[in-house]
Image (tube, rainbow, N blue to C red):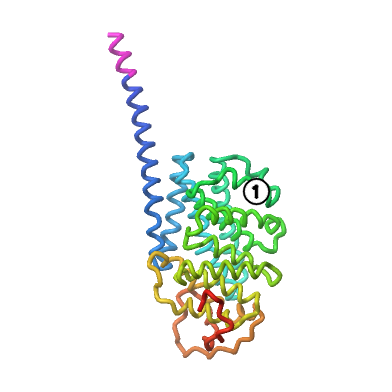
């Protein structure tokens, strides 16, 4: 009798342990499958649908991370999700409010974007620590960080984590460019993106190349030749189908004081008709930014002269994005102003 009782107790214990293992396997499988299927969101061109999906997605993976804290797929989706949310939606709201002159709303959305980037960076560093915990020591300077990244991240699969973490880092610095403590660590985001590009340059439609080009075009005193070289490469490789590259080209044109080129590339973005179904969401976001970049105040920030746009007809519908009217479309830029890859 005692033997039977002990046997039943042992069997129950084993069953409970087995059930726990099965639940863990099912959860890990669900997280893995969700990561694989997440790319479908890139094909959605409806900005508001994407906004709702992105908010739901980050909350879903926050819960999954709570249930499976060591699952690297969940950590990755949190890095990607919070970076994307911060850039595509919270920062977008900040830019709309800034153009509208609503200081209170602008500050509110700026803080939302910062919180998103902070969270993405926190999860990204947690994910890097799964490979090696030496990040804090490595980021003493650019050389030590590059050496550490080269030593510990040498697989093509590492490129995604480095890309999203580097993108969040640079986006946060850009958002907080008036705060020296953040600007002082700009090199961290650059090093992360450079390593991602070395491992997998085609990732996210040559996204690291385009983002690094924007970094090199950050001021008129920056590395503008390098910026143009990278932009031309990204345009060539993406066949002009990734409209975000053209938006970054406009940033280069701005610091070069080339108004004809600036207007040309931005109007090319606005006139593009679904150039690549797999890039619909990226391109929808690029169109919103292009429209704002053609706004009179944005162009004046580049030092460009802008004619006053005609007043809209009475009762005209407001833009769905909440943006003010862009500057009128310019005449075609002279051939000499068109970059080599844009011809």
Specify the quadrant of the image occupied by residue 21.
top left
Q: Which residue is mark 1?
A: 145
Which is nearer the eye, 286 or 114? 286
Give the quadrant of residue 64. Answer: top left
Count the numbered circles shown.
1
Classify mark 1: residues with Cα within 10 Å, few (<14), some (14-19) or many (20+): many
308 lies above or below 285: below
| SS under mark 1 | helix
Comparing 77 with 93, the one in front is 77
Q: Is residue 191 left or right of residue 317?
A: right
Q: Residue furthest front?
A: 340
**Residue 91 x/y as whole percent:** 55, 65
Using the rendered view, name the quadrant where residue 102 is placed. Answer: bottom right
Q: Residue at x 36, y 36 (%)?
A: 23
Q: Quadrant of the N terminus?
A: top left
In the displayed structure, 329 sits above or below 240; it is: below
Is residue 7 highlighted in magenta?
yes
- Residue 189: percent from the left, percent from the top? 61, 56
Residue 181, percent from left and from top: 71, 56
Residue lying at 68% horizontally and 52% vertically, measured from the top left = 142
Residue at x 58%, y 83% (from the top left corner): 336
Q: Position of residue 118 (x, y in %)?
A: 59, 53
Is the magenta region chiefly helix, strand or loop?
Answer: helix
Q: Which residues are magenta?
A: 1-10
């Amino acid at each position: 009798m005692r033997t039977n009782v002990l046997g039943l107790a042992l069997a129950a214990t084993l069953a409970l342990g087995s059930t726990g293992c099965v639940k863990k396997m099912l959860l890990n499988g669900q997280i893995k499958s969700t990561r694989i299927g997440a790319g479908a969101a890139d094909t959605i061109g409806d900005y508001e649908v994407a906004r709702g999906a992105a908010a739901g997605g980050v909350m879903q993976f926050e819960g999954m991370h709570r249930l499976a804290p060591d699952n690297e797929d969940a950590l990755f989706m949190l890095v990607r999700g919070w970076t994307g949310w911060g850039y595509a939606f919270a920062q977008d709201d900040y830019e709309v409010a800034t153009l509208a002159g609503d200081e209170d709303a602008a500050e509110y959305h700026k803080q939302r974007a910062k919180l998103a980037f902070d969270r993405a960076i926190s999860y990204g560093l947690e994910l890097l620590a799964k490979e090696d915990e030496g990040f804090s020591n490595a980021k003493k300077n650019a050389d030590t960080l590059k050496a550490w990244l080269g030593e510990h991240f040498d697989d093509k699969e590492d490129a995604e984590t480095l890309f999203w973490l580097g993108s969040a880092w640079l986006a946060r610095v850009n958002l907080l460019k008036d705060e020296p403590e953040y600007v002082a660590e700009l090199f961290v985001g650059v090093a992360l993106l450079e390593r991602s590009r070395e491992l997998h340059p085609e990732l996210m439609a040559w996204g690291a190349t385009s983002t690094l080009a924007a970094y090199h075009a950050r001021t008129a005193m920056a590395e503008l030749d390098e910026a143009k070289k990278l932009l031309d490469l990204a345009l060539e490789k993406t066949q002009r189908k990734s409209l975000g590259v053209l938006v970054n080209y406009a940033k280069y044109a701005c610091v070069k004081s080339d108004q004809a080129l600036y207007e040309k590339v931005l109007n090319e973005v606005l006139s593009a008709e679904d150039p690549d179904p797999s890039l619909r969401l990226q391109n929808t976001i690029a169109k919103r930014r292009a429209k704002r970049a053609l706004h009179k105040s944005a162009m004046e920030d580049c030092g460009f002269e802008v004619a006053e746009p005609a007043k809209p007809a009475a009762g005209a519908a407001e833009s769905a994005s909440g943006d003010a009217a862009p500057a009128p479309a310019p005449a075609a830029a002279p051939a000499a102003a068109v970059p080599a890859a844009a011809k």
